[in-house]
Image: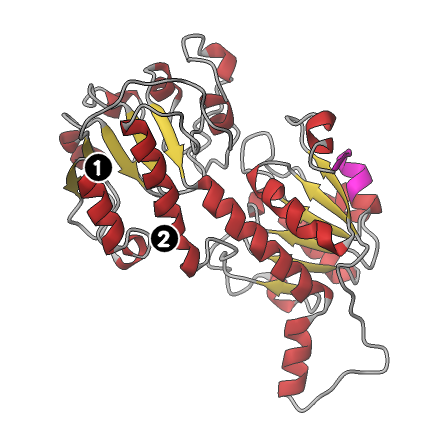
Amino acid sequence: MTTSPTSMPAVSRPRILVAAPDNDLWNSFLLPQHKERLAAIGEVSWNPLDREWTREELAARLPGHEVVMTTWSAQRLDAGLLASAGELRLVAHLGGSVADVTSPELYARGIRVITANRAYAQSVADGVIAYIGAAARQIPQYHSRVLSDGWRTETYRNSGLLDKRVGLVGFGAIPRELVPLLKPFNTTILAFDRYVTAKEMASYGVQAAELEEIFAGCDIISLHLPRTPETHGLIGQELLDLMSDDAIFINTARADVVDEAALCRTLTRRPIRALLDVHHEEPLRADSPLRQAENVILMPHMAGPTIDRRPVCAEIVLADLERWTRGEPLIEEIGPVTASRMTQEGFYWQTPLESWPDIPGGN
C-alpha cells in the first residue's frame, strides 16, 4: 500500500453510514473504543440489524452521507445504488479485497476507497509461516500418532524452512508482507506475477520467475493469486506434475485458482505435502476426496486475520478516515487498477478497465 499523494480539502464532521451489521463477527472488529472514535470523527448512523442491509435498505439510507463503512458481504456500490448516494465521497472498507464492493462507476465519480487490506495481508503472511512449519514438520500427523499411542517410525519424514527455495505465486500485498518473514530462514525467494516487474520484485530481494520454474524448482510453493476471471483454474495438472516429491504446496488464496480434481489426483498419487486453507465448497463437503488424503492438512479458511488482529483492521481504517477529514494523503487507499485485480466473488470487473476512460488515474 502506498500513500496517496492527492491533496484533499478537509472535511469537518462528515456524516458516516456504518453498514456493518450489529453482530458478534463485526463487533469483534469494531470494539467500543472504535465506535467512540467514529463518533468523534463525525455524525454516525448505525446498522441496528444483525445482518447486512438489502440493496433497497441501503439505498434508502445512503442519501446525505459522505462516508459509508462496508464489510465483506456488503452490497456492491454500482450505478444503481450510487444513484441515491449523491453526497458519497469515501468508502471505508473493513474487509481486504474491495472488488465486490466497488465498481467502475464508483471510481468514475471520484469516490475514494480505503481498506483494511494491509492488516489482512500481515495476518495471512503470519499464517503462511505457521502453515509451512505445520506441513514441513507434519505436526498434525505426528500429534495424532502420539495421541493414538504411537511414535515416530525409523523412516519418519519431516523438513524445515531453513535454506529452502520458496516460490510465491502472485506478488501482491500478502507476499510483500511475507518476504521479510521468510528472509531470516536464509531462503531463496522466487515469485510470479504478470502485473509486477522484475525490477520491483528485486527491490524486495525476490527473483522474478515463470510458473513452470517455480513449480519445478521450489521446495515450497505458496499461492497468493486473487480469484479473478484471469486466474480461475490457472494451476492445473501440468504445473502440479512439475513439483518434486518433497515439495510443499500452500494455498491461502482462493481454491478456484487451482484445478481441484488435478490437485486431488496429485495428492493421491504422490507424496507431496499440502496445506489448504481454502476450498471450492466451504464448509468442505463430507465426501471430498481431500478428506482421505494423508499428505494434506485441511484448515477451515482462517489464515487471517486472526481474532486478535481484527481490531487492528478497524484501527488502520479509522486512522485513514481521520487523515481524510484533515485533507491529508491516504495510506490505505485502493485505486481502480488494484481493485480490478483483487479477489472477486462475483467477477464484476470482467469489463476491461481501459473501457472506462473517465475513471481517474492511480492504482
Q: Residue at x 42, y 13 (%)?
A: 360
- Circles 2 and 1: CB distance less than 8 Å? no
Label disc, if present, on residue 311 of the rendered structure: 2
Quarter of the view holding residue 247: bottom right
Colour scheme of this structure image?
Answer: secondary structure
Q: How many marks?
A: 2
Identity of the amino acid at label 1? Answer: Ile
Foreground of the two, 65 or 353: 65
Q: Residue at x 19, y 29 (%)?
A: 14
Whether residue 178 sits left or right of residue 192 in the image: it is left
Q: Is residue 248 visible?
A: yes
Q: Which residues are magenta?
A: 206-214
Identity of the amino acid at label 2? Answer: Pro
Mark 1 surroundings within 10 Å by alpha-carbon count, few (fewer than 14), some (14 through 19), many (20 or more): some
Taking the magenta stretch, the answer to whether it contains residue 63 is no
Label disc, if present, on residue 41 of the rendered structure: 1
What percent of the width, then of the height, locates residue 151?
Answer: 74, 86
Q: State the separation of the CA atoms marked 2 and 1.
A: 18 Å
Quarter of the view holding residue 61: top left
Foreground of the two, 18 or 259: 18
In the picture shown, does residue 116 fall above or below 276?
above
Quarter of the view holding residue 269: bottom right
Q: Nearer the viewer, mark 2 or mark 1?
A: 1
What percent of the width, then of the height, locates residue 218?
Answer: 80, 48
**Considering the numbered disc 2 on the image, is that residue within a helix, a strand or a loop?**
helix
**Considering the numbered disc 1 on the image, is that residue within a helix, a strand or a loop?**
helix
In the picture shown, does residue 195 fall above or below 52?
above
What percent of the width, then of the height, locates residue 262?
Answer: 70, 49
Foreground of the two, 232 or 335: 335
Q: Residue at x 18, y 28 (%)?
A: 65
In the picture shown, does residue 136 fall above or below 68?
below
Q: Is residue 280 visible?
A: no
